[in-house]
Amino acid sequence: MFRKNSRGIVLVFAVAGTLFASALFAAESIDARTLEYTVNGVVCEGYLTRPASVKKVSPAIAIVHQWKGVGDHERSVARRLATLGYIAFAVDVYGKGVRPADSAAAGALAGKYKADRALLRKRVAAGMDALRSTPGVDRNQMVAIGYCFGGTAVLELARSGYDCAGVVSFHGGLDSKNPADAAAITGRVLVLHGGNDPNISQKDLNEFLDELRHTSVDWQFIAYGGAVHSFTDVSAGNDPSKGAAYDERADKRSWRAFMDFLNDVLKK
């Protein structure tokens, strides 16, 4: 089925079938499917989940991927959120079939979008628009979250002035090409940061905090002691000396902070 929204983004719903949660999500069933959408001639393929039980409208959460594109981690988060009653959509910034094979390729591709913040904002906004146009989504109850590269992306979405209830960055980049853009932020901001993340310089951290202090934005910044980059990603290994590693304590604490944020911002 094809659908076109007010921004001219063509949506293609490709039903992959009804999926039931695995043992981790056994308490409730969910529906999951791929969702294709086209922006400026580029076909993107995201992953949409929702509770199997029918509701007229539900709050919605967009998930922006790390540097290797939509993968198991993003799909797992989407399914987890669906079991909690949200419609969740893993946004595809790179385009259908564009999935870096290794870290070098991922770094180059992510770098392209970080260098062109206007393009990054446009791709993330397109994913949000695709979610907004999905039947059953409460358009006034939308949040965007992102991991690593995706954390950078949702902060840029907020700086662009995109209308949503809030954004959440998990171990994302903090630097801004134009700090004055923070004045355009309309929703709440939550940043969940690894206190020992070597990818974030003290300069970037200080400038980010100053950026928000000079606005009226409702924001919160939480740093987790001992955690490095990718602290929510179990595939990152367990050796912090490499600069990126899973940290179970920080993962659980950041998820609780995220849940508190949703409870404050969204109504189910």
Image: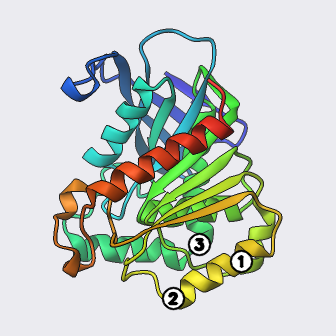
Observer-side mark, 2 or 3, equals 2
The image position of residue 188, as x and y in percent, is: 70, 52
Residue ranking furthest to the top? 54
Q: Secondary structure at mark 3?
A: helix
**First in sequence: mark 2 vs mark 3:** 3
Mark 2: amino acid: Gln
Q: Is residue 114 left or right of residue 240?
A: right
Residues at circles 1 and 2 in contact by the CB criterion of under 8 Å = no
For badge 3, the amino acid type reads Arg
**Residue 211, label in figure:** 1
Q: Position of residue 90 (x, y in %)?
A: 43, 43
| Mark 3 in CB contact with mark 1 (< 8 angstroms) | no
Q: Quadrant of the C terminus?
A: top right
Residue 196, how many percent across, how many down? 37, 78
User: In the rendered structure, which disc, 1 or 2, sits on the residue that comes first in sequence?
Assistant: 2
Residue at left offset 44%, top offset 19%: 51
Q: Label 3 belongs to which residue?
A: 117
Task: In the rendered view, tell whether residue 122 sits above or below residue 228.
Answer: above
Residue 10 in view, yes or no: no
> Mark 1 falls on what kind of element?
helix
* Residues at marks 3 and 1, CA–CA distance in whole angstroms: 17 Å
Residue type indicated by callout 1:
Glu
- Asked if residue 14 lies left or right of residue 209, the reply is left
Depth check, front residue: 263 or 151: 263
Q: What label sits on residue 201 in the rendered view?
A: none
Identify residue for label 2. Answer: 202
| Label 2: which secondary element | helix
